[in-house]
Image (cartoon, rainbow, N blue to C red):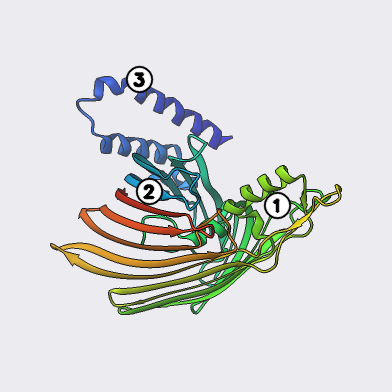
Amino acid sequence: MKQVITGMLLGICVCLIGVGSTALADELSNYELTQRLENLEEQAGISGITGRWTDRLALSGVLEAEAGYESVDYDDPALDDEEASDAVLATMELGVDAVINDSVSGHFLFLWEEDDTEPVDLDEGFITLTGGKGFPAYLTAGKMYVPFGNFASNMVSDPLTLELGETRESAVQAGIEINGFYGSVYLFNGDIDEAGEDSHLDNYGGSAGFAMENDDFSVDAVVSYINNILDSDGLGDYAAELMAESGTGLDEYTAGLGAHAIVKVGPVIFIAEYITALDEPEFVSDTPGAGFTGEEIAAWNAEFGYFFELAGKPANAGIAYQGTDDAGDFLPEARMMGTVGCEIFEATNLALEYFHDEYENDDTADVFTAQLAIEF
């Protein structure tokens, strides 16, 4: 009851401050107002219970503005080649991290993207419980990107491995890290179910890896598994549309395997990643002849980057070769790309990128992108 009464008194005081804030606007800075609020918390006995909010919250964000040009050359002579250009605010992210105590933390991230159908999306939101230094394990619950694949890149565009394997779900994840070795397992209820089955928490996966770092060298190598790669963000929509059009359902989950290695030696970094389905998906139907077998799709990324100084500013350059197997027109069969970027002001980066795509049907595409980004 005492906490309730003190909370009510604090609320009344805060309201009085709000009413009088116009008159005090010329006399009080934001810092002074914050100090007054924290003093009220201490007087009410609340800071001893919850801690000061300024000590427990951290804000972060990203803004990415892009201008680009794309040229598509169709192999089919009946189709006209296409050209397009545009300038957009490609990405806006705003994240909040809250440290409640040594064992409890929370995180959420709002995301807006130019090509997204949702105006603003809760991209991530989860609670993490940790065992502390004596027990290096954790439990995370909420909306997250499950640890299948890594998708690290120095390029402006996302790698093809991300387009194939990235999976965001409401999940429960448990993990541990000991002497550089780390691993985790996770469980969730996916959107793509087996034909005739009810919706349950029957999607799962795990990852295991090793990481080490010193002044001149670092390495991170991981193998990951998921029991249904067709539930990834990219393949999920593709599979759902395919099944709706054909009147079929998924016979059994199609497992996926991922592996990546990131090695950094001085100013040089090398990234290699491979994502693949472990079997051909089987689509079944009660209608005779409607069922069919899909492809055992795979994607990879091999990337080389170099970090240096340009006019006293941090800069980087990189090249990459990416590709897929059995992706049809869903993803390009081969992608060759390069990028160069420089920090023109503090936390402000300008990057230029070019890539050339080749598809299985011999269509090609060339894309130039300039990106201006800030992080805070």
Sequence order check, earlier mark of 2 and 1 = 2
- Residue at left offset 30%, top offset 34%: 33
Quadrant in the picture for residue 21: top left
Residue denoted by label 2: 71
> Residue 48: x percent and y percent?
46, 47
Q: Secondary structure at mark 3?
A: helix
- The one nearer the camera, 300 or 314, is 300
Relative to 90, say whether 218 is above or below: below
Residue 189's label in the rendered image is: 1
Instruction: Give amino acid for label 2.
Output: Ser
The answer to whether the residues at label 3 and label 2 have Cβ atoms under 8 Å apart is no
Q: Is residue 237 left or right of residue 248?
A: left
Relative to 7, say whether 66 is above or below: below
Q: Secondary structure at mark 1?
A: loop
Circle 2 crowding by C-alpha within 10 Å: few under 14, some 14–19, many from 20: some
Sequence order check, earlier mark of 3 and 1 = 3
Instruction: Give amino acid for label 3.
Output: Val
Q: Secondary structure at mark 2?
A: strand
Sequence order check, earlier mark of 3 and 2 = 3
- The one nearer the camera, 150 or 66, is 66
- Residue at left offset 57%, top offset 63%: 148
Q: Could you tell me how far apart the alpha carbons at marks 3 and 1 are, in whole angstroms?
A: 48 Å
Instruction: Give amino acid for label 1.
Output: Asn
Q: Could you tell me how far apart the alpha carbons at marks 3 and 2 are, in whole angstroms?
A: 58 Å
